[in-house]
Amino acid sequence: MQKSDFWTNAAKEGGVVGVLLAASMLFENYAFLSGSVGLMGLMMVEWIAVVVLHYWLLHRYTKRYGQQFPVEEGFPFGRAYSYVLILSIFAGVILGLVQAIYLHGIIGYEEYMTNYVNSIQELVSNSAASAQMAPMMKQMMAQLEAASTPSVLQTAWGAVTNSVLFGGLFGLIIAAVVSRNARPFAPKEEE
């Protein structure tokens, strides 16, 4: 496999995962900020579907990458794991760009936090346990309001970090499943 093909394929495949995660982030923000209980229920279903699809895509792409290595060479755990991490970095860059543009450019971070706090307060006030949660909610709201506004770069870097974290966790499982030992004395296939 040529080096340029490796990076091109990794960027394309990571881009697909990044677009999936960015679309999920946009829908989840819309559903949460809308305050609609039905959309929030749908958001939970969507979240589970995205986690499964995220894992499946990483597994599929890593398995396809591993099939390019001959049986004699094998596909070691480290190579499989590093490929998942590289895909996750590319996905995180796409997600980070979308999240930074959305939070800082389209909505505005202060407006987003105001809507976020209002949505949480509305959810808690409609719940049966709102009286017991009131002191905790006041403390949480005070912390949210006192927090400083992150820069665009911090927002983007946070998305990259989260993507690599989830990719790293998924990668442990994926690399264990798709890796294979080298078999230097395997019979040659007839051409």
Image: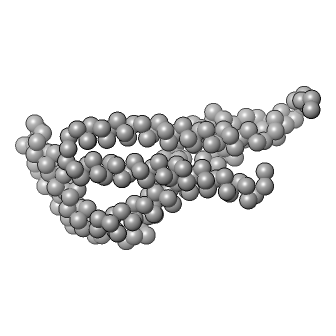
- Which percent across, then down, holds residue 108? 29, 68
Left or right side of 40 for 73: right
Asked which quadrant contains residue 99, the reply is bottom left
In this view, the residue in front, 153 or 8, is 8
Looking at the picture, tell me which residue is in the foreground, 162 or 10.
10
Q: Nearer the viewer, residue 34 or 86?
A: 34
Q: Is residue 139 left or right of residue 75?
A: left
Asked where in the image residue 40 lies, by quadrant, the reply is: top left
Query: Seen in the image, is 25 located left or right of residue 145?
Result: right
Render colour scheme = one colour
Q: Is residue 121 visible?
A: yes
Please count the marks in the image: 0
Which residue occupies the extreme left position in the image?
131
Q: Residue at x 49, y 38 (%)?
A: 53
> Does residue 143 appear in this view?
no
Q: Measuring from the top left, give residue 33's x and y in whole percent.
A: 24, 52
Image point (31%, 41%), residue name = 43
Name above or below for residue 119 compared with residue 173: below
Residue 16 lies, in percent from the top left, at 54, 50
Residue at the (29%, 51%) spot, across then down: 30
Counting from the top left corner in percent of width and height, residue 191 is at 92, 32
Residue at image location 26% in from the left, 62% down from the top: 112
Q: Is residue 89 left or right of residue 103?
A: right
**Residue 60 in the image: above or below residue 140:** above
Residue in front for this viewpoint, 75 or 69: 69
